[in-house]
């Protein structure tokens, strides 16, 4: 009966609304702690939190807080409670009521592919925006071959995308050992027969075979075409490696973001790595071409999303605007990256263990470990 | 581990939210004040939600025991007269006074008159557990000459316990106010 009056919205449709800045009112019915930790954001989104367990007797009390004539989306962790509340809103006479299919879990896992640009030799570079969690992956496609950088756990998305482009995935690369999300690099390499590349200094404890990412060991995608040039850039982790693709793009991993810089503490050695981080940001990157387009592995705020959802900026612009690149004093820099850091990402220790192959959690457990924001940047408060 | 006494066990295994909370609310409506319910759930999200729900409704969330994938949540239905003023036992002690005497390792007995489930999840080390409802039948476990500090959550049940003890000839009985709700000293559980 009431099922006919509420409609479902998929994570993909919601992503479109956020990127196109369409008006939407969200009623998030998760508990307050989960809501305060992590929620759906967007310029055109108005969001309030009322836990579903306050609405067991009905929604009459909150009707005045729900705008009339606006699209209403009810959101919960998985889906059940949002339907429960959405149905009551519909029964109370509200039209245009949606629930988020699969809840925050599916929001956390959705990837939106956006094209970054063409490569000189006919290839293309794509960015995959994991909008719910702030993770970014990349795929370079050229002459029927593809390489994926910082692949996420949802590897079928990359396989499907490569297939649509008529390309075979030949290489998967991780800029570093991730602590905020589970890498899909190894799994994707296994299923596609690709080679998995990791920085050796981050891989000392891994339990599986891999190819070593080292300066001078360029990786080629397609017949003649893209050159992926590794640049050793420690600081977020001791092995962190950046890639220069096609002399145009600088994939910085978790070292440099658009509005912030990487934090050095997630592997437990903030003090030791501060000087590496400073050296990378203030000397190493400075010696590169300032026209390079920076493509990070994360964004922290929705404001970092540009046109169509792209997250990118010119290196020279970041030297002007990014607060993390404009700290003159070394002691001040040390303070910024070691004190008052945001909380560490959910389950980051277990995530690191998983990425090293030391533990093998189930799909459900992996999903739970990744819940919440990424918090890899110094300024993600 | 202690055996936790409950008045009702509610099976919410295999149910996804919102159902564990919906069922808990219905069951709680049927309980008497002061009774304890054990809610068995497998939905991990039920932990934060049941705590939030208890906070909002004023019911007392006692704690959760995990057994593999099974979560057992314990809740106590609050009673309105727990905070009501009635005839009081004249001798009282503050939490601070009790803490000082504990730290001085003086020879005192702490009697905890809350339900065993409350006691299981949070108690003062060394406290003796006799729930208020069982006190009259179990007086034999206490010595009338002992110096007794009686605690509960807010000082209400312990006040009734003190009055009962005094009427049975216990001479040195003090009601600890407010009790566990604001206890900042050492605790232990399970």
Image: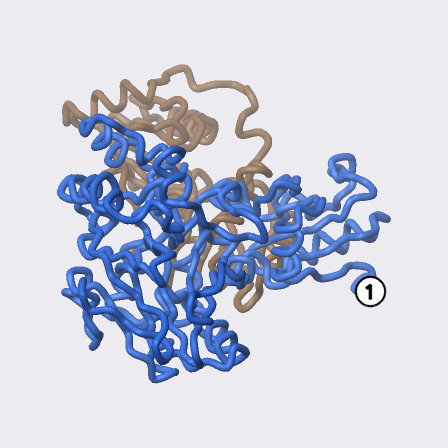
Chain colours: A blue, B brown
Of the pair A87 and A345, the residue shown nearer to us: A345
* Other residues around mark 1 within 10 Å, as few (<14) / some (14–19) / many (≥20): few
Residue B23, placed above or below residue B130: below
- The residue tagged with tag 1: helix, strand or loop? helix
Tell me the chain of label 1: A
Out of A126 and A259, give the one closest to the viewer: A126
Quadrant where the image shows the N terminus of chain B: bottom left
Q: Is residue B146 visible?
A: no
Q: Is residue A198 left or right of residue B13?
A: left
Classify B166 as above or below A312.
Answer: above
Between A48 and A172, which is closer to the camera in this rendering? Answer: A172
A39 left or right, relative to A295:
right
**Image coords of residue A332 (percent x, y):** 23, 26
In the rendered picture of this protein, how many numbered marks are placed on residues? 1
Residue A60 drawn at (x, y percent) = 78, 41
- For disc 1, the marked residue is A4
Determine the residue positioned at 57% across, 49% down: A307
Task: Indicate the quadrant where residue A350 lies.
Answer: bottom left
Q: Position of residue A262 (x, y in %)?
A: 31, 44
């Amino acid at each position: 009966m009431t099922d006919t009056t509420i409609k479902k919205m998929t994570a993909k449709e919601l992503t479109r609304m956020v990127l196109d800045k369409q008006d939407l009112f969200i009623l998030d019915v998760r508990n307050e702690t989960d809501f305060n930790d992590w929620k759906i954001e967007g310029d055109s989104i108005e969001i309030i939190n009322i836990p579903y367990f306050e609405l067991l007797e009905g929604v009459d009390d909150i009707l005045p807080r729900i705008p009339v004539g606006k699209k209403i989306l009810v959101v919960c962790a998985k889906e059940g409670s949002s339907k429960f509340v959405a149905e009551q809103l519909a029964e109370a006479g509200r039209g245009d009521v949606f629930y988020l299919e699969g809840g925050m879990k599916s929001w956390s896992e959705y990837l939106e592919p956006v094209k970054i640009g063409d490569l000189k030799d006919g290839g293309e570079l794509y960015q995959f925006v994991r909008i719910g969690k702030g993770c970014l992956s990349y795929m370079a496609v050229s002459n029927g071959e593809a390489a994926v950088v910082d692949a996420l756990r949802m590897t079928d998305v990359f396989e499907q995308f490569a297939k649509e482009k008529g390309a075979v995935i030949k290489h998967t690369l991780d800029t570093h050992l991730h602590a905020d999300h589970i890498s899909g690099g190894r799994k994707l390499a296994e299923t596609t027969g690709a080679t998995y590349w990791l920085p050796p200094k981050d891989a000392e404890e891994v339990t599986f075979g891999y190819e070593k990412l080292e300066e001078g060991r360029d990786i080629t995608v397609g017949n003649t075409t893209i050159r992926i040039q590794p640049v050793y850039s420690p600081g977020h982790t001791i092995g962190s490696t950046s890639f220069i693709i096609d002399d145009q793009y600088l994939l910085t991993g978790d070292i440099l973001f658009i509005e912030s810089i990487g934090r050095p503490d997630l592997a437990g050695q903030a003090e030791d790595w501060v000087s590496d981080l400073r050296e990378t940001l203030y000397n190493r990157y400075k010696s590169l071409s300032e026209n390079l387009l920076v493509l990070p592995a994360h964004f922290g705020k929705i404001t970092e999303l540009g046109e169509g959802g792209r997250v990118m900026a010119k290196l020279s612009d970041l030297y002007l605007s990014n607060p993390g690149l404009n700290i003159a004093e070394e002691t001040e820099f040390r303070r910024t990256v070691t004190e008052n850091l945001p909380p560490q990402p959910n389950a980051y220790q277990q995530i690191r263990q998983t990425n090293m192959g030391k533990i093998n959690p189930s799909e459900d457990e992996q999903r739970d470990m990744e819940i919440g924001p990424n918090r890899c940047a110094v300024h993600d408060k | 581990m202690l055996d936790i006494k409950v008045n009702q066990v509610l099976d919410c295994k295999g149910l996804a939210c919102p159902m564990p909370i919906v069922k808990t609310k219905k069951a709680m409506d049927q309980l008497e004040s002061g009774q304890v319910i054990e809610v068995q759930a497998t939905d991990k999200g039920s932990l934060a939600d049941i705590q939030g729900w208890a906070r909002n409704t004023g019911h007392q969330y006692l704690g959760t025991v995990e057994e593999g994938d099974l979560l057992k949540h314990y809740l106590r239905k609050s009673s309105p007269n727990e905070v009501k003023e009635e005839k009081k036992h004249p001798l009282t002690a503050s939490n601070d006074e009790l803490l000082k005497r504990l730290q001085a390792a003086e020879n005192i007995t702490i009697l905890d008159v809350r339900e065993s489930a409350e006691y299981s999840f949070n108690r003062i080390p060394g406290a003796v557990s006799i729930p208020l409802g069982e006190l009259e039948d179990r007086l034999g476990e206490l010595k009338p000459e002992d110096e007794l500090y009686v605690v509960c959550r807010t000082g209400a049940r312990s006040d009734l316990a003190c009055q009962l003890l005094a009427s049975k000839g216990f001479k040195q009985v003090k009601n600890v106010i407010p009790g566990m709700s604001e206890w900042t000293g050492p605790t232990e559980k399970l």
